[in-house]
Image (cartoon, rainbow, N blue to C red):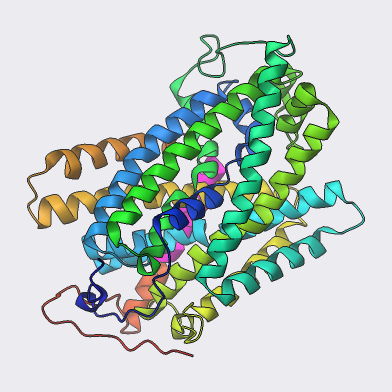
């Protein structure tokens, strides 16, 4: 049984409703990651990896398994919402936590906008009579309403949507496998390794793109204050979701790579229209399968995926606001629904505004994707450092495997990927980090230096968070 006084040790009240079970966390994580996520970015990863798309996803799984392990270590130490913001702030120092939260905002705040935009563009291509802005408005409105009702409603809706995604994926896998067995396409292991094109920097650059498909397993940690069973459930769910999704990602991209109609053109020209996967599906089963995969991807990104992304974002804003590191109105919790209502509404508004603006830019999707991936990977690097500092240095843990080797290996892999990431993403990401440093300096000058409640558990000072 979860200790109901756990949050009180850190100066917080239990305000969010603990209604989520292990299966809810699995469904949430899978929906956030989207089992069919590679369909939308398959062409970019294929071209970026020299055709070794399955290898890029396999390395992504390995890299993030270490990250999931570090999350499990830190969520046990600090079982509360806020993810890397809280883990770095409490494991290293409050200012570092602020900067970690600022960096991961690139992931959490921008992800819903990206998902809404991708889905709306795809649906507009399928139903041209409905403009992109109207699709955007519809997706944001539906998700904001569902998330405002309460976390249980979100869990129910996401489970239903997850079943639909898995059915579509099963149909593709079955038909693609039959097509290859019937002589269509070409059986090959080149999606895992091609001696003619393989270089580590090439693959690492592709992994930095493929990471977009994996983002979401970490969002489970945002639900630490809404989960029955405590931190153990969070760690188990994150590992399970990551491995399950990784297997599905590798399987579908491997099959699609063997069915690409013109590999040379895809490698040379890339996939500017984002249709490479659907072209492979057309080879496997005809136009109906291509349309099914395209529509399913659009709906998955626009409804369940962006719905759970909005939940994670609102919890990050809530956690930072109750620590007075963001405006206080974001810490307001609805008494009747037990959700951070203002943070939920603001996330919906920002996602809509961002989507409408970037829909007018030709590079909107690419720009958002690069920023999101960079922010997430830098935050993961800070997470690994937090494990070492908190457990090994501060608490003098003797478990060198869990608190030094595992986070050290995870850090090294991700650092290599970040170094080989898109240069534009590096520049924009570092500019965002520099802005965070300026904001942090402003907080110090205003006498509001970051302070996290309960860093000395023996003298808890419960912060009264306003409820509405």
Give the total number of marks visible in the rendering.
0
Q: Is residue 15 visible?
A: yes
Q: Residue at x 66, y 64 (%)?
A: 354
The residue stretch that appears in magenta: 420-437
* Residue 135 locus on image (x, y percent): 78, 61
Is residue 282 positioned above or below 106 on the image?
A: above
Horizontal side of 434 relative to 369 (left or right) equals: left
Q: Quadrant of the N terminus?
A: bottom left
Is residue 223 positioned above or below 160 on the image?
A: below
Horizontal side of 396 relative to 289 (left or right) equals: left
Horizontal side of 28 relative to 8 (left or right) equals: right
Q: Residue at x 53, y 80 (%)?
A: 341
* Residue 208 locus on image (x, y percent): 50, 37
Q: Is residue 305 visible?
A: no
Residue 209 vs residue 75, the one in the foreground:
75
Horizontal side of 397 relative to 329 (left or right) equals: left
Main secondary structure of the magenta stretch: helix
Spot the residue most to the right. 129
Residue 7 vs residue 365, the one in the foreground:
7
* Residue 376 locus on image (x, y percent): 45, 50
Q: Residue at x 46, y 72 (%)?
A: 317
Quarter of the rendering containing residue 182: top right
Quarter of the rendering containing residue 177: top right
Is residue 360 positioned above or below 422 on the image?
A: below
Is 202 contained in the magenta span?
Answer: no
* Residue 247 locus on image (x, y percent): 49, 32
């Amino acid at each position: 049984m979860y200790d109901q006084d756990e949050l009180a040790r850190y100066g917080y009240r239990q305000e969010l409703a603990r209604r989520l079970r292990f299966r809810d966390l699995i469904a949430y994580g899978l929906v956030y990651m989207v089992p069919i996520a590679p369909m939308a970015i398959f062409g970019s990863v294929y071209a970026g990896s020299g055709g070794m798309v399955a290898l890029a996803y396999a390395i992504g799984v390995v890299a993030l398994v270490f990250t999931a392990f570090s999350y499990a270590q830190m969520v046990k130490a600090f079982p509360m919402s806020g993810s890397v913001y809280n883990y770095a702030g409490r494991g290293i120092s409050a200012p570092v936590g602020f900067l970690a939260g600022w960096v991961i905002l690139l992931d959490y705040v921008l992800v819903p906008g990206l998902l809404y935009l991708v889905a709306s563009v795809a649906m507009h291509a399928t139903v041209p009579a409905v403009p992109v802005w109207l699709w955007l408005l519809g997706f944001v409105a539906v998700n904001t309403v569902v998330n405002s009702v309460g976390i249980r409603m979100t869990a129910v809706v996401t489970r239903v949507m997850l079943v639909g995604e898995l059915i579509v994926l099963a149909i593709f896998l079955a038909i693609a496998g039959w097509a290859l067995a019937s002589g269509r396409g070409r059986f090959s292991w080149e999606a895992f390794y091609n001696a003619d094109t393989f270089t580590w920097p090439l693959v690492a650059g592709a992994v930095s793109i493929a990471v977009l498909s994996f983002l979401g397993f970490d969002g489970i940690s945002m639900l630490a204050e809404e989960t029955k069973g405590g931190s153990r459930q969070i760690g188990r769910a994150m590992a399970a979701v990551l491995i399950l999704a990784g297997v599905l990602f590798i399987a579908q991209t491997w099959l699609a790579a063997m069915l690409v109609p013109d590999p040379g053109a895809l490698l040379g020209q890339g996939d500017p229209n984002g249709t490479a996967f659907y072209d492979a599906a057309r080879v496997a089963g005809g136009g109906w399968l291509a349309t099914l995969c395209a529509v399913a991807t659009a709906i998955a990104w626009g409804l369940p995926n962006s719905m759970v992304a909005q939940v994670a974002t609102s919890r990050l804003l809530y956690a930072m606001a109750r620590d007075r590191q963001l405006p206080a109105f974001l810490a307001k919790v609805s008494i009747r629904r037990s959700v951070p209502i203002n943070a939920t509404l603001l996330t919906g508004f920002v996602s809509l505004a961002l989507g409408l603006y970037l829909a007018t830019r030709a590079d909107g999707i690419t720009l958002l994707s690069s920023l999101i991936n960079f922010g997430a990977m830098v935050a993961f690097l800070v997470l690994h450092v937090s494990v070492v500092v908190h457990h090994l240095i501060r608490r003098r843990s003797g478990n060198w495997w869990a608190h030094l080797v595992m986070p050290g290996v995870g850090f090294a892999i991700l650092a290599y990927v970040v170094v080989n990431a898109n240069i534009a993403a590096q520049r924009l990401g570092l500019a965002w980090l520099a802005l965070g440093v300026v904001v942090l300096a402003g907080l110090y000058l205003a006498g509001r230096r970051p302070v996290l409640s309960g860093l000395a558990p023996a003298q808890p000072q419960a912060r009264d968070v306003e409820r509405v």
